[in-house]
Amino acid sequence: MTGGDIAALIAAVAFVALVVALIVPIVKLGRLLDETRQSVREVTQGVLPLLTESTEAVTEANRQLDKVDDITTSVSKVTDRVSGVVENVTSVIDSPIARVAGVLGAFGRGRRRRRGLGRK
């Protein structure tokens, strides 16, 4: 056996030792990947019902918001109408009240003048 043959033999033995040493980590890595795959399946099976429930909840929330929007629109219309009625009533009442107040004010001034003249 020459020196090259011995070197080749040592290299071959080292390579076999390396392969044998790597078999255990590779097998463990395979098991880890299998467990990971199983965990992903379980999580996926658990998440799908949650997504379905979430979708249903969001759909119901949107329905309720549509109802609230309709109510808000109706309240806004009623408020506008009440505001218009108040403006109309105010304009109708303000003029006669101002006239009555003017007449009463004039009456009161006239009365005070009479009292003032009668005392002196």
Image: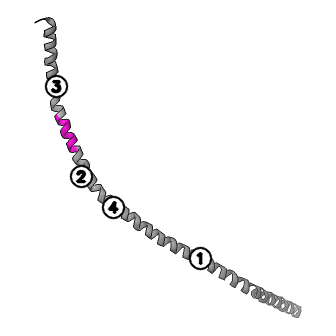
Mark 4 — residue?
52
Question: Closer to the observer: label 3 or label 2?
Answer: 3
Residue 53 location in percent, x, y? 33, 62
Residue 42's mark? Answer: 2
| The magenta stretch spans residue 19 | no
Query: Picture quarter containing residue 63?
Result: bottom left
Residue 77's mark? Answer: 1
Q: Are marks 3 and 1 in contact (CB under 8 Å)?
A: no
Q: Which residues are magenta?
A: 27-35
Mark before the other along the chain sequence, 3 or 2: 3
Q: Are marks 1 and 2 in contact (CB under 8 Å)?
A: no
Q: In the structure shown, which secondary structural element does the residue marked by tag 2 occupy? A: helix
Q: Residues within 10 Å of mark 1 (few under 14, many from 20)?
A: few
Mark 3 — residue?
19
The answer to whether residue 7 is above or below residue 55 is above
Amino acid of disc 3: Val
Between the residue at mark 3 and the residue at mark 1, the CA separation in whole angstroms equals 83 Å
Q: Nearer the viewer, residue 9 or 32?
A: 9
Q: Nearer the viewer, residue 108 or 89?
A: 89
Q: Are marks 3 and 2 in contact (CB under 8 Å)?
A: no
Q: Residues within 10 Å of mark 2 (few under 14, many from 20)?
A: few
